[in-house]
Image (spheres, rainbow, N blue to C red):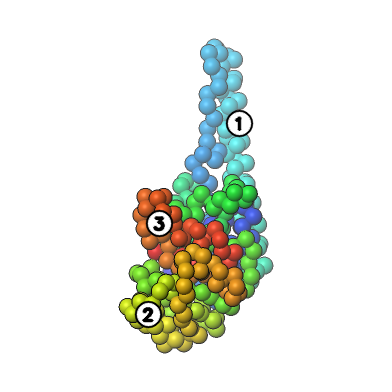
Amino acid sequence: MAEKITALVDASLYAASVCEHAAWISQRTGAPVQLLHVMGRRQGAAPQDLSGSIRLGARTRLLEELAELDARRARISNEHGRAILDDARALTEAAGATDVTTRLMHGDLIDTVADLQSETRVVLIGKRGEAADFAKGHLGSNLERVARISHKPVLVASRAFRPVSKVLIAFDGGASAQKAVDYMATSPLYRDLSLELAMVGGPDPERQRKIDAAATTLRDAGLDASSRRVEGQPEAALAQLVEEEGFDMLVMGAYGHSRIRSLMIGSTTTQMIQSCKVPLLLFR
């Protein structure tokens, strides 16, 4: 069974971009697209028993009405989910994908994504979800959770899709960065694209050896790849590089430290997602 591009869609402003990015990947790799909408356990859940101390027939009638209301609520919620998927399919096919399926599931999104790992090539998710606070720049509540549990690459879609021709790879010599390089060397997604590896920080012979080897791996695979070293803090230096030199995508390792450490000192991954206006492809 061919591995699928699993695109997580909802009613957010990012859904169209997720669909268009999925179509772009599908066209370049030949992989089928699976549009997935997961309805949480709270959606359509039974309301509280509001009948209080009502007795006899009145209580029975009220409970029947509450049961009918619950059933109607669940039916509307299902119809809403299917409408989201129908619209997403139309968008994805209009963007050029030809093998597109839809899937409506109930339960926890993270559990569902984990269960589908074996049939997934890459996971797509919008930077912000339906309830995101744009004024405060909050990321979608599920984004970090998906990126932390996924063993497959996670593409975080930007608000609007644009064709990708120039890709920046944040390379620190770690396992996640090397995994990204190995993936890109064997994937048709990066054929004919311009790739640049960037290492942030002062001179370091061992790290320089690793980035040179990574660039060689990509060039040996027939890809157009170069490398450089830049000064500064990773978050600021990489964001500036993306903005000033017109990169269309950033590839980097995701959440290399524990959640506790991230809470104490912040997370480079989260800061890059917040600051970059281009899609990010994350590897764990």
The one nearer the camera, 177 or 150, is 177
Q: Nearer the viewer, mark 1 or mark 2?
A: 2
The quarter of the image holding the N terminus is bottom left
The location of residue 75, given as percent across then percent down, is 60, 40
- Location of residue 207 with respect to 55 vertically, above or below: below
Mark 1 vs mark 3, foreground winner is: 3
- Secondary structure at badge 1 equals helix
Residue 50 position, x and y percent, is: 55, 22
Residue assigned mark 1: 69
> How far across and how far down the image is residue 12, in percent?
62, 52
Q: Amino acid at mark 2?
A: Gln
Q: Earlier in the sequence, mark 1 or mark 2?
A: 1
| Closer mark to the observer between disc 3 and disc 2 | 2
Image coordinates for residue 72, horizontal then vertical, percent = 61, 36
Q: Can you say which quadrant of the picture contains the C terminus?
A: bottom left
Q: Count residues near mark 3 (Cα–Cα under 10 Å), then give few for <14, some for 14-19, many for 20+.
A: some
Q: Are marks 1 and 2 in contact (CB under 8 Å)?
A: no
Q: SS class of the residue under badge 3? A: helix
Q: Secondary structure at mark 2?
A: helix
Residue type highlighted by circle 3? Ile
Residue 203 visible in image: yes
Q: Residue under label 3, please give it.
A: 149
> How far apart, in angstroms, are the residues tagged by discs 1 and 3?
36 Å
